[in-house]
Amino acid sequence: MSGSSNKTAARSARRSEASGPATPPLVAELLEECRLEVLGAMKPYLGTGGPSPYLYELAADYPRRGGKMMRPSICIATARAFGARSSDAVRSAVAIELLHNAFLVHDDIEDESEMRRGAPALHSLHGVPLALNAGDAMLLLSLRPLLDNRKNLGPQLALDVLLDTERMARESAEGQAMELGWRRDNVMELEDEDYFTMVLKKTSWLAVIYPTRVGALIGTRGLANLDQFIRFGFFLGAAFQVQDDLLNLAADHRYGKEALGDLFEGKRTLMLIHTFRSGTRTERAKLKAILGAPRSERCAEDVVWIRRLMERYDSLNYARRIGHGLAGAALHEFAGIFGRLPASRDKEFLRGLITWIFERT
Amino acid sequence: MATSKSRMSREEPERTGPNRMANGTSNGSRTSGRAETARGAANHREVIKRAVELAYHVVDDHIRQGQQAAERLSAGTYTSGDFDDDLRICLDRALKLSKEWGVVGVDFFAALRRMAGFRMGPAPAAPDVAVETKSKRRAEVKFHLRPGMSRFNPLVPPLHSADRSKEPLNDVHFEFRDRSRPVLVVNIPDGHPPGVYNGAIVDSKTHEPGGFISVRVLEQDRR
Amino acid sequence: MGRSQPIKVVVIGGGCASMAAAFELTRPEHKGRFQLTVYQTGWRLGGKGASGRGRAGRIEEHGLHIWLGYYENAFKILRECYAELGGGSRSRRHEDWRDAFFPDPYIGVSEPDRSGAGWAHLTAHFPPAPGSPGDPSPSDSLSLRNYVIRSAILLRVLLIGVETVSPLDRKQHGADELASPRAIIEKAAFLLRYGFLATAAAAVEALAVVEAGLKMGSELPAGVILRLVEAVAANVKARVENWVTADDEVRRRWEIVDLVLAVLVGIVRFGLLTDPRGLDAINHFDCREWLRLNGASQHALNSAFLRGLYDLVFAYEEGDPSRPRLAAGDALRGGFRMFYTYRGAFFWKMRGGMGDVVFAPLYQILRRRGVRFKFFHRLENVRLSRLVPEDGGERAYVKTLEFSVQAKVRGGRDYRPLIAVSGRPCWPSHPDYTQLENGAALKTEAHNFESHLERTKAGARTLRVTRDFDFVVLGVGLGAIPYVCKEFIARDCRWRKMVETVKTVATQAFQLWLSEDLQQLGWEPPPVTLSAFVKPFDTWSDMGQVVPAEGWRRPPQTIAYFCGALHEADDGETLAKDGYYAASREKVRSNALAFLDHEVRHLWPKSTAPEGGFRWELLVDANDQQSDETAPARRRQTRAPDRSRFDSQFWVANVNPTDRYTQSIPGSAEHRISPLDNTYDNLTVAGDWTSCGLNLGCVEAAVMSGRLAAHALSGSPALEDIIGYDHP
């Protein structure tokens, strides 16, 4: 079974690469609609004015900065594609966005990032202890809308959503642990398989798998087979991540984070591990040495050398191709899941996302 | 004013360090890297195909693990992951060796920890159990046995598919034929619907779970 | 890429590395592709290898310059240089390199004797090995496996009790029965099981098994070998520790056995035979520390042998004798090369100063090949292009080079640096002021143009990329880098790390011209190079062979060179203090006087005066060179010379940053920068402080580095042709 599906997925990939992206404007429209809806629904949960000035303002900072709200939109769209209404899914969508932002706060601390969405990272503004606390609080804050689900989804369905939330949180933490562990132990001998596993857990679960599963749970009142969303979500999420990593290396300053920041961080991207595998013994030793040193000792010369090495081994194109392949597989899985559903804006939106990720800047 | 000559730059060196494995060691490692230079669209297609296959492999494993975890969760005996066992086996070996050689254990542990790494893949099948599949269809059997399990009489209750409409696989059991290693016998009746069938391996005495097994029956026939 | 114009290369510094690079880049095979200009401070080439001529044409060196029999690259260049020179016309003293270098097979180490009041000296004679260094085919396979096998052989020989250490001894004892891995394992198991290793003979047999096993390569599990080696080690150690030894000779042999065993155990235990880093894998250990980890006894660690090794490479942090530090990997590499791969003789001494023997011929050949030399040019700063990090294309590069012109040559001509002494071209100890503008004034002012603190200048000169140079070979000593490469250090963390971790040490030396020969002085054994003697002058070499090259009317009987590390802080502040140079020189002088009064009699028993102290009349004063027959009588009438006679000799305090000796401190090798490194794509570095494969302070490392620099710029010589570069 997997043999034949691989072939068709690969065919889809080639087709998508050949014909080029054709994202309907629908994607941007629907994203914007959902964003407004979610923002509105989020307000009561971000209520400030508690006794402590050091918590709620901080917790509300990242969500207020904006962002495309891709994750909550996926949740709402999936729910609607399966026949539910926005109002059924919107609280879960709010929770997703709050969780996402909570993880961002922690990620920024762990990666020692300086910027987020065009402004200084939370820990840069308030220091690590307060930011860390705010991140933790945001995680717990996100429980509230999920608990409120009991009212309109019923206790069983709300519990199902909570259980999936636990699963997603665990997978994300495991994925993050993998990545951090690689950095701490300066592991560079990684295969693509390792990278996929890490991305599956760390990125895909929160970005696509969980939102679609929750959406499907809500839309089918708990009857959907959830495992198929793991495949779709993984491929889409991984393609998203690879594209993200490529953009970081293109060093477009409008992106909102520092140029070549990933290299300074030592993030194990598909490109970096490919470069490492391809390099000569001395190059590998040098790469390991640069990435093994503390971040403060990494200088521009080192990063430029790595970047140049990536060019030499064509690692960027390698990753780009794989990204396209993953998108193709996502398309294939999409067809399998949503194929028999009636046509709808939401269905088109979800399908359009697959090409949209390549058109982002 | 501006010089018409462009600035000269050195050629890239083939390497910037000595080859310390040269001369007389039997390793014969290569000095140059395995640079992947894509030549032509054929290579690109190959890359994509391989990557997608790999990605499928990764996600399918992941799904299976999740199912097993779910079962463990419901059975109440959830542990934190397969990689713990790998590590434990490694460390046991390390202790034994270090006692034998009297070498400082610290270096061993460090090296082995690197080896064990953070691989979160499925644990390999216990090396001392053979698998025999009796089926007309092609089937893939993956299982994990906690160390020590093979000494007891492990029992395999029927393996179920997530699709309730499919019949379970009832005839999967261990056999101890002679003094050598045990054999896992997987019987798949002809015409059994393709799908993934999972189950736990339990200790026949205590009924404690001691492993998991997953059988994927494919559509095609063998050979 | 057709380029009609030659590539302009600026070579900064005139030491071994720069000269090697220049020699390579101007080979006839390159057909004039490179146009070189060498920029040198002061009036002479040589850097740390420079030497001058003083009164009576006596040779005045920076220290002891002895070449070792494994200096394949250095000898190759030298011999080719001589061959090319000899191809010319006139009668030259050094037509053949063998006139300039001669083999010296004796090495000695000293240790305090039993009474504690005196010293005992051990000398060893290293038998000649076939061929000569620099011969076309390199010596046997430079592999760790080979060294280990040789060590096993050596051990067997020592245990059997043979006197000399022969690198040629390859006789296999009973090797036929050890032909297969299986046989080896069986024999090893047999020896281990029955505790047969109680006797030395059995240990010998066990070593034969080890040797055979190593030759089997990877088919034999390392574990078996390790167990055997460890068992032998245990056997030997047990015997040494139980031993109350009356025989010093035997005890010293056991110390060597102990050390070699520790090396063997360490190699197997650390997996060095298969580690891709080779010996670099243990470079974060100090040598003694590593040997101790592998079971060497305290006796062996304190042995004269090991002390001599540290002394030979001045391995004392900041020259402090209480802080010996030597990277284990670099030490092993140097030790293996030194003992196992020498060709001809262990040592090769020069019949002249190094400047005369090495740098004068090189200068002449390079001039002939069209290289230009700019003396009295001192590098002040290297300026880089702006850093553009996001841009994947353009590299940073050297933009300008700023020099001070210390003195200008009259008429704008090229400075002619050589003088003739005894009919041969040499470097003087002072500049030829007659060639310089303002020469008379400069002479009176007595500037030391080689001193770091000397700031006199007659002008400045800035060279710009493309207009004046295409490539740069930075061959200055490591000590100069913090001063002239400030931009590198500010923005490149690797350069910063390098200057922080790769260290140099100041050294002190003095030379004596003696009116009696060694026998008369009381030294019985043949002339020797000896180390591990009392500090600070722990190394002595008899240099009688250079007497004929000097210009004495009444020559001394012999010459003695003494040297050692100088305990000085490593910072720029100390250097800048007023009168620092004078104070250092004074310190060395008083060290020498004390040494001569109290210590040298342990070497030369008959050099003591009846009332105690040194016999100062032994020292030959170059000013005192009347050939008058009545001179001896006249001398007897005047007052007997006292310590002030020492002032007529020669001594140095090498505290100038670029005169300091490059050390191999644990943890520093990985931070050295390679000449092949292409971060600044019109620059290469050269010197024994670079990552040159050998990573020790010596002529060979500098020459290897220079050849690497030439490769970096031209692709030639091939890396495989730089002998010893690809080496564990």
Image (cartoon, rainbow, N blue to C red):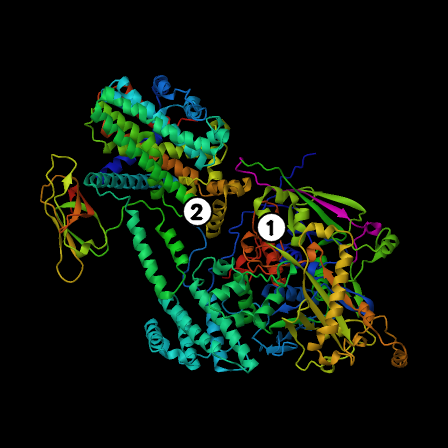
Res. C619 image quadrant: bottom right
Residue depicted at 79% across the width and 62% down the height: C428
**Element assignment for label 1:** helix
- The residue identified by callout 2 is A186
Type of residue at label 1? Glu
Q: How many marks?
A: 2
Q: Which residues are magenta?
A: C390-416
Query: Above or below — where is A106 with respect to C588?
Result: above
Q: Residues within 10 Å of mark 2 (few under 14, many from 20)?
A: some
Give me the disc on residue C500: 1
Quadrant of the image containing the N terminus of chain C: top right
Asked if residue C406 is among those painted magenta in the image, a careful observer would answer: yes
Residue C287 place in picture, x, y as percent: 53, 63
Give A300 or C286, whichever is nearer the viewer.
C286
- Viewer-nearest residue: C484 or C426: C484
Q: Is residue B200 left or right of residue C156?
A: left
> Magenta stretch: residue C144 in it?
no
From this view, report whether residue C397 is shown above or below residue C667.
above
Q: Nearer the viewer, residue A328 or C190?
A: C190
Which secondary structure, mark 2?
A: loop
